[in-house]
Amino acid sequence: MDISSLLTAIPGAISQGILWGVMALGVYTTYRILNISDLTVDGSFATGGCVAAVCLVNGLNPFVSLLVALVAGLLAGAITGFLHTRCEIPAILAGILTQLGLYSINLRIMGRSNTPLLKVDTLFSKGKELLNLPSQYVAIIIGVVLIVLLVACMYWFYGTEIGSAIRATGNNERMVESLGVNTKTTKMLGFMIANGLVALSGALVTQSQGYADVKQGTGAIVIGLASIIIGEVVCGKRRNFMVRLSTIVVGSILYRVVVAMVLQMGLSTDDLKLLTAVLVAIALTVPVMLEKRNQNARYKAHIEG
Amino acid sequence: MLEIKHVSKTFNPNTINEKKALKDITLTLNEGDFVTIIGGNGAGKSTMLNMIAGVYPIDSGTIVLDNENLSLQPEYKRARTIGRVFQDPMMGTAADMEIQENLAFANRRGQKRGLGWGVRKDEKEDLQKALHRLGLNLENRMSDKVGLLSGGQRQALTLLMATLKKPKLLLLDEHTAALDPKTAKAVLELTKEIVEEQHLTALMVTHNMRDAIAIGNRLIMMHEGRIIYDVQGEEKKNLTVEDLLIKFEQASGEEFANDRMMLSK
Ligand SMILES: Nc1ncnc2c1ncn2[C@@H]1O[C@H](COP(=O)(O)OP(=O)(O)OP(=O)(O)O)[C@@H](O)[C@H]1O
Ligand SMILES: [Mg+2]
């Protein structure tokens, strides 16, 4: 491995990790807080990118196009939420249906499969002019500012009455219903928030890479899960909520750094998806195996002692 | 207060698993009635409570609480005025949330929930006072996760949560059955205290006939989806376990021998 070229790749990896970290925060909302696996993500991530690209090409302000992308994500989440809560389709299937449908919608939004952002201003090109720094550093700065804002917002929101109701829904649905809250509504909100964040992330990534692609969301859900799990493995699970949210972003950054490293080691980008899938599968398996081993060890110790 | 008229429920109709769980139940509760419900396994006790709470839709009949027709309302809407404690101590609380978060969540029953704090600073003191009365020393563990509590502690907490905002009706389904005898007794005492203090109208399912006689002002016996015996006031106070057994045999024409009720003295 060439250390010096790795080092030059690190800032880019960090900025990618931060921008994709916004998506991981969205995945966390469904996967950990609501305790539902939502597969809309691959579609809504691309939706965010496509919507932002079309907005930019049509001369909208880069910041406003982020907001439009966010709203598109909220709507995508609402569709999955509707399919799951009202039509009572199992969450995983509901997510897959929306994701599939979004592929066509995303193509319709852009009118083609790829939209380059060559001659338009993005958040990052403007930031670059303003700060006069290399683009990776500009992306890091913008990303950090956004992440701090988002984490603060989420921390606040999940402390409110509605936020508590969403958390409680992921914890004990029966209890929530028995205390007068409609869990259909709380789940719907969760799906919307999650996909809003995911689309926002898609829009940010699109702006930073300078194009939108209808396939840019492929595998996003797995990357989101990887970020959450890496964060949990590295920083531990039982912690203050603010710290937990931050560890997800840390996980996302670590994931990108690992990716940069294996690319430096000569792996091709085509192999990345397999690598990610294997990584997540291992990360999900390890805790189970450890628990089993501990259980067996306890049992043996008991017999012998 | 509570008027149940001709309520029936059949599970899995028109299949080989068809089960008529409730058959034309009619029951009127007065304000302040504390009713104990006994009956063998599968008699329909839980189903009746679930019908009142709105867990499943009823097939026919009406349920009216305080002049409000609940028959077609979803569970969460009914829950605004109905408090419930389940048999399973894990069911009534959110394990990964703090004790104070659980309480504050229950404290907002029936209110619109918005973007105000989930636990307000000024309500903490009230919550702490409410916890204090449980006598479990939980008032000093307000920020502990509920998952750290024992089954009995959780059940006491659930009872408190169900009654924190005075419900029009309190439904207790064998809420002490999963606890050890000593804890069960304590939770039962607490139940009596709270119901009396707040003058609640309550329905309590129990398998313990002595408790069923000793607690409350009215007793109902169910069998195969029907109410087969309904007694209150003096007559109820003077009941003995023997009386109940005889009543059951008369009404059902069956031996009680291997029923679980036999075991609990
Ligand atoms: N969701 C359901 N689906 C199908 N059958 C059900 C359902 N719930 C209850 N039953 C059936 O309805 C009948 C009444 O059940 P219920 O739970 O009300 O009895 P119970 O009186 O509470 O008994 P126990 O003392 O065992 O708790 C039983 O035969 C039961 O199998
Ligand atoms: Mg029962």
Image (cartoon, rainbow, N blue to C red):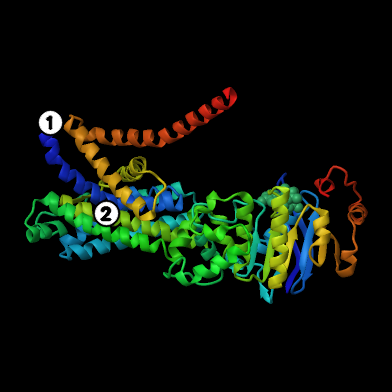
- The quadrant of the picture occupied by the C terminus of chain A is top right
Q: Nearer the viewer, residue A215 or B221?
A: B221
Amino acid carrying label 2: it is Ser
Residue A116 appears anywhere in the view = no
Q: Nearer the viewer, residue B89 or A34?
A: B89
For the point 74% across and 72% down, the residue is B32
Residue indicated by mark 2 = A201
For the point 28% across and 50% down, the residue is A21
Q: Where residue A175 sits: x, y (%)?
A: 57, 58
**Eye-nearest disc, 2 or 1:** 1
Relative to A250, does residue B83 appear above or below in the rendering?
A: below
For the point 44% across and 59% down, the residue is A188
Label 1: state its secondary structure.
loop
Q: Where residue B70 sits: x, y (%)?
A: 65, 69
Binning the other alpha carbons within 10 Å of mark 2 as few (below 14), some (14 to 19) or many (20 upward) gives many
Q: CA distance from mark 2 to mark 1?
A: 31 Å
Please tell me if label 2 and label 1 are on a single chain.
yes
> What is the quadrant of residue A232 in the picture?
top left
Label 2: state its secondary structure.
helix
- The first of marks 2 and 1 along the sequence is 1
Residue A2 got which mark?
1
Q: Where residue B163 sits: x, y (%)?
A: 63, 66
Residue B45 appears anywhere in the view = yes
Relative to B247, does residue A290 appear above or below in the rendering?
A: above
Q: Nearer the viewer, residue A87 or A180?
A: A180
For the point 90% across and 63% down, the residue is B238
